[in-house]
Image (spheres, helix red, strand yellow):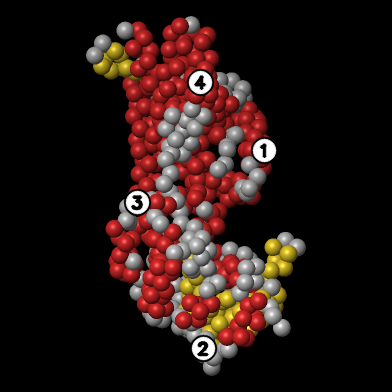
Amino acid sequence: MPEPILSIRGMDAHYGDFQALYGVDMTLAEGEVIAIIGANGAGKTTLMRSISGLTQNSSDQIYFRGQPIGALRADQVSGLGIALVPEGRQLFPSLSVEENLQIGGRLMRKGPWSLDKIYKLFPVLEERRRVPSTSLSGGQQQMVAIGRALMANPDLILFDEISLGLAPVIIKSIYAALPGIVGTGMSAMIVEQDVSKALSVSNRLYCLQEGRIALTGYAGKVPREAIIAAYFGVK
Amino acid sequence: MDWVNAAVQGMLLGGLYALFAAGLSLIFGVMRLVNIAHGDLIVLASYLGLTVVWALDVHPLAALLIVVPIMALLGYVLQRVVLNQTLGDDLLPPLLVTFGLSVIIQNLLLQGYTADPQKLNAGSIETASVAVGSLQLGLLPLLTFVTAIVVIAGLQWMFYCTELGRGFRAVSDNQEIAQLMGLNRRHVFGLAMALALGVTAIAGIFLGIRTSFDPAAGAGRLIFGFEAVIIGGLGNLWGTLAGGVILGIAQTLGAKIDPGYQLLAGHIAFLIVLAVRPQGLFPRVSG
């Protein structure tokens, strides 16, 4: 069996005295897309922060292409080819749309994504490339956040709450773009509250509940009742 | 005509104040660090210039070629080794540490160079003047003013047209997300301090040519720098130049009324701006 691109082994995560994750085990194969679902406070964002290096863990709890990365800083993790689309977009307000995209590509990793490709994926961004990123609508800002992560040409892209706070029509267009993104061969983890949307683009799912993995399985094969039970913690 | 002359001289003096303020503005803008030792670092650069002039027997302006890189290197090391450890949500630790740094620099200078006032001798350039209409403008103040414009234009270009500047702005906006772009904020802060102390070196050399200095001269330069930054508006480099000019004009007009009013007039102008427009005259407009 080939080495997974990402392997998480018994990961705990803490914020001071509060423990947010308990012994999480997870693997992600090359080119695979997995959905991370769970209610508020289940530990989804902590998982994303841990993988991307924003929250540091023990070095032997997260492996990327066989290399322990748990104790690395975010700038070191990003250099290895992991990009995060953070919850709430979090664009740089003093940078224009184009500058936000350019800074995503500052590490100059080789790959299929370039400024032109991002503008092809989201044409509205090219029209508005000179304006401050904060003057965009929420949906357009999410496009910039996705484009910024893609500009890094990552091998693994993490989407944290990809549709949170967006209008349904915008969510639809972003999900329409996702197959074109992950179709380029990169692996992806999608954190999402909208379970059916997440499963529509994923190979597998992990359901987190109060910091523990409550359910895992192949999308489409896990019964709806099992997902509901794991999501809400119903026995 | 005397009043016009005083105002023009004040405008040129403002160039020096803008040089004092530019480094202060830059590091506050990038890392929200208020550097109490800024004035002492300016004076340190003056003394470094003095040492280079003594050792190599060169013109003080030529000493810039050595003093600027030394100060920039000092800035990077100081930031990485000391100041980065103080940065966080609390503004107090960097204030206290830079205050301590100010005391250390003053005492080291006192130990090394004594309390005697020193001056950098730039020769005939100090007294040369050019006629503009009926006004006689000193070549040195004119050169200082032009240098300030060039420095601020350079910083502005660097901030808005280069990848390094983009990195500075990104880290200033959101340190955590900037890390996701592969930016090591500690290194970026080090580069910002290096740049700021490079500018400080220029300010120190021009200060040393214009006037005598001693180890305790830093506090006054710090206040002028702060006042120029606040008058111009935080985070706006051209505003900093305007702040320096307004401060300079207020001082020379005050001195015209009575020589004892020079500093007072500058402080009053600063207080008026602070009372009427606390955000400064030209605050940065953010998206």
Q: Residue at x 26, y 15 (%)?
A: B131
Q: Residues within 10 Å of mark 1 (few under 14, many from 20)?
A: some
Q: CA distance from mark 2 to mark 1?
A: 60 Å
- Type of residue at label 3? Val
Q: Secondary structure at mark 4?
A: helix
Residue that mark 1 sits on: B96
- Say if mark 2 contacts mark 4, CB within 8 Å: no
The mark closer to the camera, 2 or 1, is 2
Q: Secondary structure at mark 3?
A: loop
Residue that mark 3 sits on: A131
- Say if mark 3 contacts mark 2, CB within 8 Å: no
Q: Residues within 10 Å of mark 4 (few under 14, many from 20)?
A: few
Tag 1, which chain?
B
Tag 4, which chain?
B
Q: Secondary structure at mark 1?
A: helix
Q: Which mark is residue A220?
A: 2
Q: State left or right for residue A114 relative to residue A62.
A: left
Residue that mark 4 sits on: B272
Where, by quadrant of the figure, is residue B283 drawn? top left
- Type of residue at label 2? Gly
B237, A38: nearer the viewer: A38
Which residue is the extreme one toward the left?
Answer: B133
Which residue is the extreme one toward the right?
Answer: A17
- Type of residue at label 1? Leu
Tag 2, which chain?
A
Tag 3, which chain?
A
Give the x, y percent position of residue B145: 36, 27
Q: Secondary structure at mark 2?
A: loop
**Upstream in the sequence, badge 3 or badge 2?**
3
